[in-house]
Image (spheres, coloured by chain):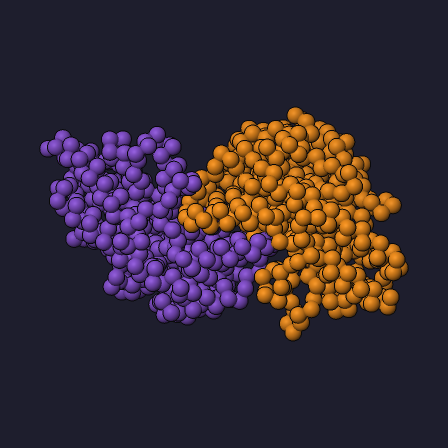
Chain colours: A purple, B orange
Amino acid sequence: MSIFDQHIDTTRLSRKKWEYEIERTGYQDLLSFGTADMDYHSPQPILEAIKAVAEEGHLGYPHIRASYYSTIEDWLSRNFGWKVNARKAVLPHVGIYMSCITAMDAFSEAGDEIIIQTPVHARFAQLVRDNGRVPVANPLKLVHGRYEMDYEQLESCITGRSKILWLCNPHNPVGRAWTAVELRKLGDICLRYGLRILTDDIYCDMVYPGHSYVPIASLSQELRQITISCYSPSKCFNTTGVNQSFTVIENEEMQERYKKSLHKTDLDYAISTIGLAVTEAAYNGSCDQWMKEFMVHVKGNYDFLVKFVQEKMPGAKVVEADSTYFGWVDLRCLAKSEEAADIFLNQAHVLVNDGAALGQGGKGFIRINLACPQDILEEGLIRMGRVYQAMASTSK
Amino acid sequence: MGYDFSKTLDHRQDQSIRWQQPEGRDDILGMGTADLDYFCAPCVKEATLAVCEENTFNYRTKPKAYYEAVAGWFQRRHNMAVEKDWIRELPSTVGSIRLTIGAFCKPGDYILMQTPCFTPLKAAIEGAGCRFLENPMILRDGRYEMDFEDFEEKIKAYRPSMFLLVSPQNPTGRVFAKDELERMVDICEKYNVLILSDEVHFLITYDGHTHTPILALSEKARKISILVFSFSKGFNIMGLPHAMTLISDPNLRKRWDDYLIPYDFHYVVNAFSIAAVTAIASGKGDAWLEEVTAYLKENRDYFVQAVKAKELPITPLIPEASFLFWIDCRKTGIAPEKLGQAFMEQAGISLNNGLDHGEAGRGFIRLNFAVTREHLELAVNRIAKMFGK
């Protein structure tokens, strides 16, 4: 049996995705496909790196070692053919959204517009708003069951106050790793209109076999000059509880501006020893095989989902994905599609995310986290299938 | 002694900020940055290893045990009731101070601080666009005292919106007595000045000096005060970032929470920090803390005596708390601007120049004595040699 089909011992855990949701909903038999975490142990090299820090038991202020930078450099070059000078371009932070917020602060002002490609993780629009900026939607287009960018709409929504295009690559929830062709086209528009590109690439290692992730900044000298790329080992290596992220900014003047914004929160002293160790372990190549196998498993779950929906949830459609561990399911055939997530939760005790929260184009969709053993997914789908049939029959 | 404080990291492994070596050297004693050289208490190791065993490092909730432990700590050690609602977390104390300033002060506002003071706090004030207002302490017979007259005068004249208290004080090592704190609170209340109390150095105190958390003082204090602290200085867990902010007054809490919304810190819950803090706060590190305090006291007394015995031209003040010496070097004849450089070049010691702590630090240095006795003796010998003794 694949390690990704094994159930881990959860007796001592207090995870947001499971124990918290069970307590919140009061459903002891809840199956959670919500919060973007995996139901697995981290790969062995991550565990060993953390254990080594814990065993050593010395936790004074850590110094960022040369190996931290060289590991990131090698990883970007080895996996994505992107050569950067990490010592100059990389700055760590305590979480990917902190990196994004800092960039927003550095490269826009209150009242400025930030373009996001909806449907996209709800926090994008929320963080833009919370920081006094205005989120402007450039909705993705669903073309033959697969999402594409809408370049025309993008050009038409740009105004004098548009400062940043906030990209998500690979895209959460639609599961697209944007191709070089798509990114170039997008990049050209940003260059033409003087937009900076802030890109959240937290799912970069999670691509299905045969597909690849392309860092937009790696595509041209011009794009390097306008891009802030944000990374974190948290999603791909299941270390969201370790609080570690970093940015890559190659434009020196932009890097200076970003640093200034970084100092506004004064979190320079908040670098975590374990976070540094995790970053090195995640990117030094020792986890590559695990990640490959994980994505084979996710693809298996995705195919299972597609087949199940075809057979048992007539009318519903699973969007074509090439990356991430999300299944993005179109339920717009149902009269009650907007209540579907609630109904699945309350009638089937299955937690999935309601697409409506993800902005324009999200209504009537649900997001299913596929990073779980297949029998859990199967059980969840069986429960959902029953409720679905009841929903579908009332739709007619 | 059950714990061994005579061992430390091999600093050539480049793991510590404090022990970074300049190009071409590997013998510099790192005695600047305020962390400790000792390995952590066994309870920290146990707690972090236990999380390793779970081997699932994803988004966590803060368990009940964490809140109970923190409340229990203050009840047991400071006779102070802390409610769960008071507790907020951020990954660092300086970050928390910076953001709390942002929540309660407008750019251009004055913020009052006692000097000499820890430089990053001045930077946090200025970073928020606020103006740094000094209330210099008075050095009287080798001990710094509050200048209450100046304190009230400055408040009257400049109407600061906040008093950023550092208690115990860094770098002077003063533990403020209850009546001193009460007087500060009275004056601040009278002029409507919010108190932000940085108590990060509260864990290690000597000679019967007792730290009083600002929120333990009185109802009056709780209405106008915010307390920031961490278990890092003392338990040496800076590498497990975790600072706590305690706010008793519901209106202050609301304002703080509203201001923090854009930063979205809810997801910044480090599983290892929570585990270590829970273990420490529940008392599992008490014995270790007691012993490290005893070890540090011996270090402190040894250094003071050695300086006296060797008739060195420097005068360390006797810290009442924490592990930092504030040393008067005005008799050395070394230009105040050059003190840091002189100790680096002539004694191979990296430390903090007093001038980095404001004008009040002119002619002083700050020296971290949370090192092994072996390193401290080496430092004494090198300093003696530097002065031809």
Q: Residue at x 52, y 43 (%)?
A: B274
Q: Is residue B136 left or right of residue B90?
A: right
Q: Residue furthest top?
A: B219
Up the image or down, B341 lies above or below A352; here it is below
Q: Could you tell me residue B269's position as x and y percent?
A: 48, 44
A316 versus B37 height, above or below: above
Residue found at the far front of this picture = B2
Q: Residue furthest left?
A: A396
Q: Nearer the viewer, residue B188 or B66?
A: B66
In this rendering, the count of numbered labels is: 0
Q: Is residue A227 left or right of residue A333?
A: right
- Residue A363 appears in which quarter of the rendering? top left
**Can I make out residue A177 in this image?**
no
Q: Residue B22: x percent and y percent?
A: 65, 69
Q: Position of residue B352 (x, y in %)?
A: 71, 58
Whether residue B199 can be seen here: yes
Q: Pick whichever, A30 or A317, lies toward us.
A: A30
Residue visible at 63% across and 30% down in the picture: B75
Quadrant of the image containing the C terminus of chain B: bottom right
Q: Position of residue A201 (x, y in %)?
A: 37, 57
Residue A128 sits above or below residue B12 on the image:
above
* Quarter residue A387 falls in: top left
For this rendering, which residue is in front, A292 or B134? A292
Residue B336 or residue A41, whichever sits in front: A41
Quadrant in which residue A222 is drawn: bottom left
What residue appears at the point 53 percent right and 46 percent down from the top-left corner? B47
For image coordinates 53% across by 53% down, the residue present is A54
